[in-house]
């Protein structure tokens, strides 16, 4: 006949902290002679169900991942051929684990207006384990500081500020705790030096797109990044790509520098403004600006001498090609003269000279001749022409 048993169960450590593994031990005591064998089933409320094998009347298992709170452990001896089953219970208490919080800043020291990143790291104190969640509150003293709450991610919280004033700032990172981890605090000191303050350079064009030959004024404005104040001095270098471009250095006045040019070729030009910095303000560059220069509109006019003219006499025809404002410069290329009296047509192409003139000398027969002059255009000027001109030729 099987003998009765008594099962006792213990837990160690007890209490345990969050993340700490707990060893559960069941001791099966026979009421009579012999040593019980077989298995013990451990059921942990709010936790796992585990099985252990008796050895010398005891069985041990390890429970991990228990949440904060009280867990009832029931150990059931399942019996064997000689001993009857029995059950024992105990309670395991899991408390919040302690934490440590550290905080660092980078770069340290920083210069006035330079963004600084503060990083708080929250770690459990052994034997606690796991990854704390919740929030960290950064309390930063001095000008530009304040109180800022940031979420934890992977046990870390970050805060970036570019507002701190010159001097030493005490930084306190306060972890608020969560269901499994206790609050903790870390401190650090950050220094802001009175070095050159960060700046921002912006660039504008007076007219975009512009026409070939049209003066364009580029304006660069340099401002200190808050909380820095003052008026930057020094120079700005305008860098312009393409035909007619180059590097042009201009002085700042009142935080503004300008450069005017009418020499840019047609097409797109990339323009940047680079501030060189001074003793109080750091260098900076503008975003790239695209300046588009379109061909200028041209105008062609025609005249002749003499008019009227005698049959067979030489007649000088003059075409003048010019830019229409705001375009400027002297067109190049050719002018095609076409002369017709209804029965005879004369067509000839003449080159525009350095002053914009094209000339044709010809003798004509008696009658009224319709004369046109058409300018072909070039890379910088559009085509144009005149067709309503009459040349009168009288009898010899």
Image: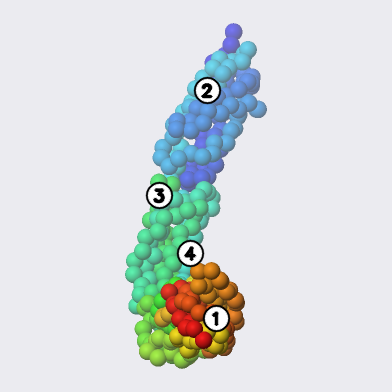
C-alpha distance separating marks 1 and 4: 93 Å
Look at mark 4 in the image and give the residue it sits on: 119
How far apart are the two marked residues, 3 and 4, measured between alpha carbons?
Answer: 19 Å
Mark 4–mark 2 distance (CA, rounded to whole Å):
50 Å
Residue 96 locus on image (x, y percent): 43, 48
Q: Which mark is residue 178?
A: 3
Q: Secondary structure at mark 2?
A: strand
Point out the residue furthest to the right here.
55
Residue 294 in sight from this viewpoint: yes
Foreground of the two, 248 or 183: 248
Q: For the residues carrying marks 3 and 4, which lies nearer the camera in this image?
A: 4
- Sequence-wise, the earlier of marks 3 and 4 is 4
The residue carrying mark 2 is 76
Residue positioned 49% across, 60% down in the render:
121
Picture layout, residue 217 above or below residue 94: below
Q: Tell me the element at label 4.
A: strand
Pointers 2 and 1 in contact (C-beta within 8 Å): no
- For the point 52% across and 22% down, the residue is 76
Quarter of the rendering containing residue 160: bottom left
Label 4 neighbourhood size at 10 Å, few (<14), some (14-19), many (20+)? some
Question: Label 1: which residue?
Answer: 364
Which of the image's four quarters has the N terminus?
top right
Q: Is residue 231 above or below residue 292?
A: below
Query: What kind of element bears circle 3?
Result: loop
Looking at the rendered structure, the secondary structure element under dot 1 is loop
Left or right of residue 271, residue 34 in this image = right
**The image quarter in which residue 230 lies:** bottom left
Mark 1 or 3, nearer chain start: 3
Q: Nearer the viewer, residue 126 or 65?
A: 65
Q: Earlier in the sequence, mark 2 or mark 1?
A: 2
């Amino acid at each position: 006949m099987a003998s009765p048993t008594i099962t006792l169960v213990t837990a160690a450590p007890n209490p345990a902290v969050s993340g700490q593994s707990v060893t559960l031990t069941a001791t099966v005591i026979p009421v009579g002679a012999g040593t019980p064998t077989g298995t013990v089933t451990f059921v942990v409320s709010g936790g796992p169900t585990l099985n252990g094998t008796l050895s010398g009347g005891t069985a041990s298992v390890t429970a991990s991942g228990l949440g904060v709170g009280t867990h009832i452990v029931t150990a059931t001896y399942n019996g064997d051929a000689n001993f009857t089953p029995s059950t024992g219970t105990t309670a395991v208490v899991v408390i919040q684990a302690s934490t440590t919080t550290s905080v660092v800043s980078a770069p340290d020291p920083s210069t006035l207006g330079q963004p600084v990143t503060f990083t708080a790291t929250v770690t459990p104190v052994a034997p606690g384990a796991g990854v704390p969640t919740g929030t960290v509150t950064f309390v930063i003293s001095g000008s530009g500081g304040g109180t800022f709450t940031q979420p934890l991610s992977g046990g870390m919280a970050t805060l970036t500020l570019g507002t701190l004033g010159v001097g030493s700032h005490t930084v306190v990172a306060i972890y608020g705790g969560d269901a499994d981890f206790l609050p903790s605090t870390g401190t650090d000191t950050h220094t802001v030096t009175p070095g050159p303050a960060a700046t921002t350079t912006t660039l504008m064009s007076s007219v975009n797109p512009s026409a070939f030959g049209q003066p364009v004024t580029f304006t660069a404005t340099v401002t200190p990044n808050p909380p820095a104040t003052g008026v930057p001095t020094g120079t700005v270098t305008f860098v312009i790509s393409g035909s007619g471009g180059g590097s042009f250095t201009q002085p700042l006045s009142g935080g503004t520098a300008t450069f005017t040019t009418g020499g840019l070729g047609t097409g797109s030009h990339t323009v940047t403004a680079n501030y060189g910095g001074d003793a109080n303000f750091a260098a900076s560059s503008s975003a790239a600006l695209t300046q588009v220069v379109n061909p200028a509109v041209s105008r062609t006019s025609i005249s002749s001498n003499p008019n009227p003219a005698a049959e067979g006499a030489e007649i000088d025809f003059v075409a003048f090609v010019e830019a229409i404002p705001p375009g400027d410069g002297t067109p190049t290329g050719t002018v095609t003269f076409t002369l017709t009296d209804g029965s005879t047509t004369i067509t000839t192409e003449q080159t525009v000279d350095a002053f914009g003139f094209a000339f044709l000398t010809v003798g004509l027969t008696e009658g009224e001749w319709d004369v046109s002059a058409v300018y072909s255009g070039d890379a910088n000027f559009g085509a144009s022409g005149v067709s309503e001109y009459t040349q009168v030729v009288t009898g010899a």
